[in-house]
Amino acid sequence: AKSEGRGTYRFFEAEMDALHQARRNLEVALRVALDRGELELFYQPLVNTAHHEISGFEALLRWNHPQRGIVSPLEFIPVAEELGLIKNIGRWVLHQACAEAAGWPEAVKIAVNLSSIQFRNHDLVADVASALKTSGLAPDRLELEITESLLLQDNASVLATLHQLRKLGVSISMDDFGTGYSSLSYLQKFPFDKIKIDQSFIQRLAEQDSVSIVRAVISLGKSLGMSVLAEGVETAEQLKVLQAEGCWDIQGYLVSPPKPALDTMGLIDRYCVT
Ligand code: C2E
Ligand code: CA
Ligand code: CA
Ligand code: CA
C-alpha cells in the first residue's frame, strides 16, 4: 500500500487519525454538554477607572468537560458553530446572563458575545427579547458584542437585525476593534454604542506605534459619539498610557480575570458601585 516502507508517512497518518478521533470525541461531548449542565458563564468586570466603578461584566462561556476540565471557548465555540449548536448555546447564554444580571445593582450592565452565526438565525431578535422578558432585565442594561467578521457577511440583513436589536433598547458594541478589515467603513454603516479596542494593541502599548493607533481609535470613537473601552489591560503602565490618552474604561487581568457568578457580588462590593 501507499504507506509501505514510509515510516514518516505512517506516523503522520496515525497522528491524523488521533486528531480526527479527538475532534470526534469533542463533537460528541459538545452535543450533550448543554443538556448535562456542563456549560457555565464566567464574568469579567468592565471598569470605569475615573470613578473606580464597575460599569458592567462581560459574560464569558466556559465548558466544564467531564474528563478534560475547563475547555476554552476559543476551542469549542468554532466547533459549536460548525455543528449548528451555537443557536441553542447562544440562547442559553443570553437567558443565563440576563438572569444573573437582574440580581445586580441597576448601574451594572451585562455584555454578551454574539457569534456571527447567530445572525443567520432569524430568531435572534426574538431570543434577545425573550431573555429580557423572562429575566425582567431592563433592555438598557444589556450590551451585545459583535465582531467585524459579522459585517463582512450579507450586510443588508445583518444591518436590519442590528437595527431591530437596537429598537429593543439594547446597545451594541464592536468587539476586538482593529483586528478585522476596513473597520472604518463599518463605523459609518452602523452606529455602535461602544468600541472595544482589541487587546493586541494594549499588549504593545510600550511601542509608540501602538500608542498612535490607540490614540487614533479613541479620538475616532469619541468624535463619532461612541464610548471606547480598552481590552486586555494587564499592567499599571498600560493603564497609565490609556488614561493619558483619555481612555478610562478598561477590562483586563489588572482588575480581575473572568470569575464564576458567585464572585461577582464581592467584586461589585469592592468597586463601590452606587
Ligand atoms: P473576547 O470576546 O474578545 O473576550 C475577551 C477574552 O480575553 C476572554 O477570553 C478573556 O478571558 C480574555 N482576557 C480578559 N482580560 C485579559 C487580559 O488582561 N489578558 C489576556 N491575555 N486576556 C484577557 P476567553 O474567555 O477565553 O474567551 C475567548 C473568546 O471566546 C472571546 O473573546 C469570545 O470571542 C469567545 N466567547 C466567549 N464567550 C462567548 C459566548 O458566550 N458566545 C460567543 N459567541 N463567543 C464567546
Ligand atoms: Ca467580547
Ligand atoms: Ca474582545
Ligand atoms: Ca477576541
Image (cartoon, rainbow, N blue to C red):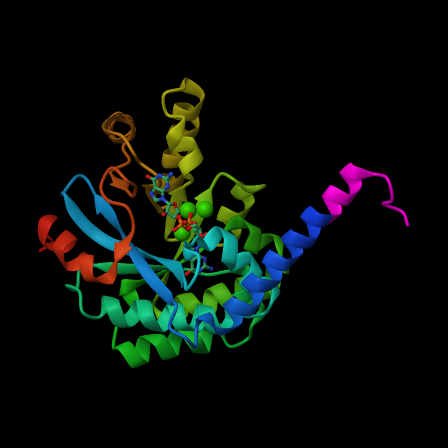
Work out whether residue 272 can be spotted: no
Q: Is residue 179 visible?
A: yes
Q: Residue sitting at 51 percent across and 71 percent down?
A: 87
Write down the region rendered in magenta: 1-13
Question: Which residue is rendered at x = 29% and y = 60% of the image?
Answer: 110
Q: Residue at x 27, y 30 (%)?
A: 235
Q: Hey, which residue is sitting farthest front in the picture? A: 5
With respect to residue 32, does 186 lie above or below?
above
Horizontal side, residue 263 vs residue 75: left or right = left
Q: Quadrant of residue 207?
A: top left
Toward which corner of the image does residue 119 lie, by quadrant? bottom right
Q: Quadrant of the C terminus?
A: bottom left
Q: Position of residue 245 (x, y in %)?
A: 30, 28
Q: Nearer the viewer, residue 12 or 63?
A: 12
Using residue 73 as the reference point, say whether residue 51 is left or right of it.
left
Q: Is residue 171 magenta?
A: no
Between 161 and 267, the residue placed more toward the observer is: 267
